[in-house]
C-alpha cells in the first residue's frame, strides 16, 4: 500500500480538529500566502475555543469583500481569498498568539473589537520569537534564550538570564495541534516546495504541530520535485489537499 | 499648530532621499513600513545593496509600479510587489529572523512614534489603542548593527516625538543611533542627542523648541542637504 497523504477534500482534512485546539495559521499579510481553503473549512466545521497563532489576526468577511471591490494597492485580491479574521469574527477564536493583532492605524479588525469586549485573549509577541518558537517545536527544542524583548511588554512573566553580559529572555517552543499552511507543489509523500514570499510562516509552521495540513496548487508525481530544492521534507507533513481548479467564491460551500 | 507652521519641512520622499545617503554599497539593509520603504528608490542600481525584507527575501529589486508585472508571491513586508533581481533568495520566516537576530543586518530603517534621549524606540503602540502590533520591528531594533529612525519631528498635533524619556510603551531599549526627521538629522550618543544637520530656514534653537530632549549642538552643525 503506497504512502498517500493527499486527501479528497478540505472538509475531510480538518474534520478531526477539536474545540479548544491550537492552530498555527500560515501566511503573513497578503492574500496569496494564506491557506484560504483550509481556513474556510475550519469556519464550516464550526470548532470553537481555538487558539490561533500567526503574524496577523486577519480581516472580517465584510472587510475582505471591501478590499476585493476596492482593489486596493497593486496586487489583485483573488476571489477565493479567505482571511483568518473570518474565524475570529465568527467567534471561533478564544486566544491569539500574534505579532500583528491590530492595525496600528486605519481599519478596526475583528480581533481588536473582541479584545476591547474582553472576548478574546492576546499573547503579543514579535515575529522573530514567534517564528523561532515554532521552529523549536519542530526541532524538539523545549525552549531557547533570545535577546529580543527584554525590558518590554513581551517579557512579562518570562525568565531573564545574562549571556556574555547581555540579558536574554527564555522563550518556550510553541507546538500546535494543527498547522494549516499554503504551499505551491507537493507529492503524495508530503514533500513541499513554495512559491516566492509564500514561504514565510508556511514553511516555518510545517512540522510545528501534531498534524500539518498543506493546501497546495498542484500534486506532482513522486520523484518530480527536485530533491535539491524541496523546502519541507515529507515527515513534517501529514495531509495534503489540492486547491480546486474552479475557484470557490463562497467560503460556506463544502469543498 | 505652532509658531513654526510657515517653516519649510521635508516631505516623506525627501526624508527618504536624505536617509539613502547612509546606505552604502555591500550593506545588508532592512527598510520598515512607511517612509523607510521609500529609501530604496534613491539607491541607484549600480550601488549594490542587499535589501532584506523580513517576510523572507534578501536581494530584491525595485518596487514594481506596473500592475502587469506584479507577482503576488514576490512582495515586501508592507505588501508592495518587488522585482525579482539577480542574486536574490527567498527564505522562511524563521530563517529570515535568524538572519536578523544573528546580527547580519547592517542597517535597519524604521518609522517611529517616539525616540528617547537614550535611544529608546517606541514605535508600535499608538496612544488610544488597546494594544499595538509589534510585528517584526522588535527583532530588528534589538539585533541590527545600526538602527536609523525616519519620522516627522513632531506629532500631527504639534507635540514632540524626540523625548527626554519616552512616554509610550517601548519596542526596544537604547537601540536607535540616528534620527532623520523632516527638519533635522540627529545622532544618539553617550552624551545625548547631537544635532548634526538642520534644514535650511531653521536654526538650532528653533529645532530645540520643538524637541523635548535636550539637544547637544556642536559648533559645526551642517545644513541638511539632499
Image: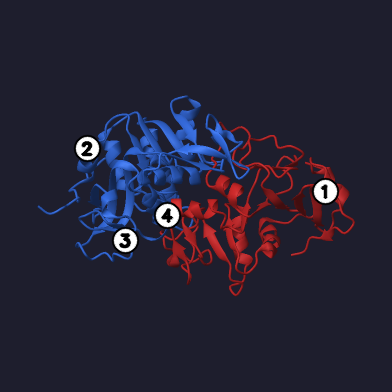
Q: Kindly identify which residue carries mark 3.
A: A230
For the residues bearing labels 2 and 3, Cβ distance under 8 angstroms: no
* Tint of chain A: blue
* Disc 2/disc 4 C-alpha distance (Å): 28 Å
Residue A89 quadrant = top left
Look at the numbered disc 3 and give the secondary structure of its residue.
Answer: loop
Residue density around tag 3, few if under 14, some if 14–19, many if 20 or more, within 10 Å: some
Bin the neighbour count of mark 4 within 10 Å (Cα to Cα): few under 14, some 14-19, many 20 and up.
many
**C-alpha distance separating marks 1 and 2:** 63 Å
Q: Position of residue B225 (x, y in %)?
A: 77, 64
According to the picture, the residue beneath numbered tag 4 turns out to be: B92
Q: Are marks 4 and 3 on the same chain?
A: no
Q: Which residue position is annotated with label 1?
A: B207
Is A87 left, or right, of B182 in this rendering? left
| Nearer to the camera, B156 or A234 | A234
Query: Mark 4 and 3 residues: CB-CB less than 8 Å, in contact?
Result: no
Q: Position of residue B74 (x, y in %)?
A: 44, 61
Give the quadrant of residue A230: bottom left
Disc 4 versus disc 1: nearer the observer: 4
Q: Which chain is red?
A: B
Q: Report the mark closest to the observer, 2 or 4.
A: 4
Q: Which residue does the image show at 61% across and 32% down from the upper left?
A: B128
The front one of B171 and A198 is B171
**Label 1, residues with CA under 10 Å away: few <14, some 14-19, many ≥20:** some
Tell which subunit mark 4 falls on: B
| Rendered residue at 40%/60% (across/down) | A196
Q: Position of residue A203 (x, y in %)?
A: 37, 52
Amino acid at each position: 500500500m503506497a504512502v498517500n497523504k493527499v486527501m479528497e477534500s478540505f472538509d475531510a482534512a480538518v474534520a478531526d480538529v477539536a474545540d479548544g485546539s491550537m492552530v498555527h495559521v500560515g501566511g503573513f499579510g497578503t492574500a496569496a500566502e494564506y491557506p484560504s481553503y483550509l481556513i474556510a473549512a475550519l469556519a464550516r466545521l464550526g470548532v470553537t475555543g481555538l487558539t490561533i497563532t500567526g503574524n496577523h489576526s486577519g480581516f472580517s468577511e465584510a472587510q475582505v469583500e471591501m478590499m476585493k471591490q476596492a482593489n486596493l494597492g497593486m496586487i489583485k485580491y483573488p476571489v477565493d481569498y479567505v482571511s483568518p479574521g473570518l474565524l475570529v469574527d465568527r467567534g471561533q477564536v478564544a486566544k491569539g498568539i500574534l505579532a500583528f493583532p491590530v492595525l496600528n492605524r486605519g481599519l478596526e479588525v475583528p480581533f481588536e473589537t473582541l479584545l476591547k469586549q474582553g472576548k478574546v485573549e492576546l499573547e503579543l509577541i514579535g515575529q522573530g520569537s514567534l517564528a523561532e518558537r515554532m521552529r523549536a517545536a519542530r526541532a524538539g527544542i523545549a525552549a531557547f534564550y533570545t535577546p529580543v524583548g527584554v525590558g518590554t511588554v513581551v517579557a512579562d512573566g518570562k525568565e531573564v538570564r545574562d549571556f556574555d553580559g547581555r540579558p536574554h529572555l527564555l522563550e518556550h517552543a510553541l507546538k500546535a495541534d494543527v498547522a494549516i499552511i499554503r504551499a505551491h507543489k507537493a507529492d503524495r509523500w508530503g514533500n513541499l516546495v513554495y512559491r516566492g514570499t509564500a514561504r514565510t510562516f508556511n514553511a516555518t509552521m510545517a512540522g510545528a504541530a501534531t498534524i500539518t495540513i498543506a493546501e497546495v496548487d498542484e500534486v506532482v508525481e513522486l520523484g518530480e520535485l527536485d530533491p535539491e530544492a524541496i523546502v519541507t521534507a515529507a515527515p513534517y507533513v501529514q495531509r495534503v489537499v489540492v486547491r480546486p481548479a474552479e475557484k470557490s467564491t463562497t467560503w460556506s460551500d463544502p469543498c | 499648530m505652532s509658531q513654526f507652521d510657515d517653516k519649510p519641512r521635508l516631505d516623506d520622499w525627501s526624508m527618504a532621499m536624505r536617509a539613502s545617503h547612509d546606505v552604502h554599497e555591500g550593506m545588508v539593509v532592512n527598510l520598515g513600513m512607511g517612509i523607510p520603504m521609500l529609501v530604496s528608490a534613491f539607491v541607484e542600481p549600480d550601488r549594490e545593496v542587499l535589501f532584506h525584507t523580513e517576510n523572507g527575501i534578501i536581494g530584491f529589486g525595485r518596487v514594481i509600479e506596473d500592475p502587469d508585472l506584479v507577482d503576488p508571491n514576490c512582495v515586501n513586508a508592507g505588501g508592495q510587489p518587488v522585482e525579482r533581481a539577480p542574486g536574490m533568495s527567498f527564505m522562511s520566516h524563521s530563517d529570515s529572523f535568524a538572519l536578523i537576530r544573528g546580527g547580519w543586518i547592517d542597517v535597519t530603517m524604521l518609522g517611529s512614534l517616539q525616540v528617547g534621549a537614550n535611544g529608546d524606540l517606541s514605535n508600535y503602540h499608538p496612544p488610544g489603542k488597546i494594544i499595538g502590533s509589534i510585528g517584526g520591528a522588535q527583532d530588528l531594533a534589538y539585533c541590527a548593527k545600526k538602527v536609523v529612525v525616519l519620522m516627522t519631528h513632531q506629532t500631527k498635533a504639534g507635540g514632540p516625538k524626540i523625548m527626554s524619556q519616552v512616554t509610550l510603551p517601548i519596542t526596544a531599549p537604547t537601540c536607535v543611533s540616528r534620527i532623520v526627521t523632516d527638519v533635522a538629522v540627529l545622532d544618539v550618543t553617550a552624551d545625548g542627542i547631537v544635532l548634526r544637520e538642520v534644514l535650511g530656514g531653521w536654526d538650532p534653537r528653533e529645532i530645540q523648541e520643538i524637541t523635548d530632549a535636550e539637544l547637544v549642538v556642536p559648533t559645526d552643525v551642517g545644513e541638511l542637504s539632499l
